[in-house]
Amino acid sequence: MPESVAAKSVEGQTAVASVAAQLTDLIYAEMTPGLSLPSEAEMATRYGVSRVTIREAIKMLAGRGLVEISRGRRAVVSEPSGKALGEFLGWIVQYDPKGMFDLVEVRMSLEIKSVSLAAKRATRPALAGIENMMQGMRDAGRRLEESEGDLAIERRFHQCDVGFHEAIALASGNRVITSLIEAMSVPLERSFFMSRRGKVLRGLPLESTIAAHEKILDCVRKRDSQAAEIAMRQHLEESARDMRAAFDNRPATVKT
Amino acid sequence: MPESVAAKSVEGQTAVASVAAQLTDLIYAEMTPGLSLPSEAEMATRYGVSRVTIREAIKMLAGRGLVEISRGRRAVVSEPSGKALGEFLGWIVQYDPKGMFDLVEVRMSLEIKSVSLAAKRATRPALAGIENMMQGMRDAGRRLEESEGDLAIERRFHQCDVGFHEAIALASGNRVITSLIEAMSVPLERSFFMSRRGKVLRGLPLESTIAAHEKILDCVRKRDSQAAEIAMRQHLEESARDMRAAFDNRPATVKT
DNA sequence: AGACATAACTTATATGATAAGTTCAAGGTT
DNA sequence: AACCTTGAACTTATCATATAAGTTATGTCT
């Protein structure tokens, strides 16, 4: 039997690491999202290692968000998305109690850049995407006033809020911004959910939140990037204040 | 004990995914960087799955940069770092020819925020870290003028350049910024290296680059965050112009 | 005390087997 | 002709077991 020539090409590296690196190169060089990797068996013979080794290498790529795995099908190259990155940000934010505030601080910069670019570059369909989310917020807001405290609707509202910002990022035409904002929404969403369960309600009235978004959308429509920046900054500062306030009178539910 | 209760708790999820999720929770909840996970055998019995399943789950975490693996030792929880994130950014930037410019665009926002915070918050040792990198640039710059075109020294110069910006990010006291800037330097470094090999030299004279950094450092020392922002913006805009220019008259060297 | 051999633990990889998904086409029914 | 069924071929998911080769701790011997 051929003794795994390719796999051990670099001394001191494990076969799994080597295969993972080679697969990464392969994907970068000659594959695009949606395409399938070869079958495990085929790769195993190609790289001269066992199926186990191949599987572990693929799991590594999956952890990085480079491929998606599902049973019965070959691994598929992923569309780049912020989700995997979001997990990572969660990890960074984890330790520090002030980690979430760090995140909000960064988010402010990015969102301002994002909306500024969006005002300059948004295409028609991108604009429609933003308006769609805005409409979703209005609807959820209306229904939320009628049935007070419905958590499902509240969740829907929050999703549209997040979606609004993601749509703006998309409209910016900058993929890096899109991914980063998408990523940041992951830990933020988690934090929202937890604060919700901890009975810490958002202090901001709905109309105020909706009006702020409406204002931002309006600036983007008018292609006034400076005004858009200002509107976004105000909106985020307000919601950061709110978050901070919620954080301060929080420990009511724990002991002390 | 029942048959792998924990592993298959959520229907429709594979055992590997389930174990990976549980390990992630475990790490988030009660572990800190440097600690070791249990041995594979122990986890296998604990979660009621085979060693293979445990190994694949761990490989996923390793792909995310959550743990580090080495032979003979148990997996160790990683220090959060931008490196894994950098790979991811590389992936995002990969397709788009303008991806690198998107990255530079985002970097500008973050670096400005970074230096602004650093000017306000930098501690003594953090400042020393920045000064250290500055000194490194000066040294490398001097030696670079004497021995023209030494690639090793040039590389050293570039490392200090990157290190300078990372030191500022560190001084900002914002972990998210630190990680993101560290992450962005990965694809940027790769791009630098490639353009270097393609004989596309930086057009900027050394003194100009050094002076720009000197100026930034000075502003941080004086705790003048506004001036620091301006200096950083100028520096980055200049280097972006340079990069764009280098990119434009590029294809002459491709095939050789 | 210090060097060195060794046992105990641990990960890396391979082989072979079984179960359970997906895909696709042949053939039967309406 | 359009629609469903069925099964074969392919593919991944998981397991059990075995061997090799690292790391660490426990000694003993000088």
Image (cartoon, coloured by chain):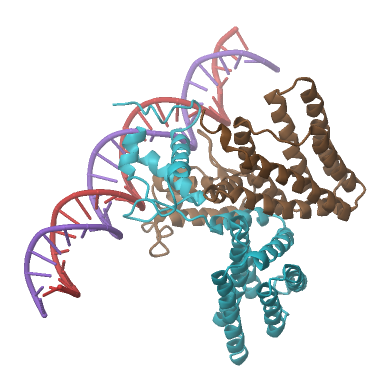
Chain colours: A cyan, B brown, C purple, D red
- Name which quarter of the figure residue A185 lies in: bottom right
Q: Is residue D5 above or below residue B239?
A: below
Q: Is residue D14 left or right of residue B68?
A: left
Most extreme residue toward the right, as rendered? B222
Residue drawn at the location 56% of the way across and 37% of the way down: B251
Where is residue B225 drawn, in percent x and y? 87, 54
Q: Quadrant of residue A149?
A: bottom right
Residue at 44 percent across and 53 percent down: it is A33
Q: Nearer the viewer, residue A197 or B93?
A: B93
Q: Is residue A52 visible?
A: yes
Viewer-nearest residue: A213 or A9: A213
Residue located 75% across and 35% down the image: B160
The residue nearer to you, when weighing B137 against B75, is: B137
Spot occupied by residue B92 in the image (x, y as percentages of width and height): 55, 51
Q: Quarter of the image containing the N terminus of chain A?
A: top left
Q: State the image coordinates of residue B144 (x, y, percent, origin top left).
A: 77, 25
Q: Quadrant of residue B191?
A: top right
Percent coordinates x, y for residue B109 in the rendering: 73, 55
* Location of the C terminus of chain A (image quadrant): bottom right
- Please determine whether, in this image, residue D29 is positioned above or below residue B50: above
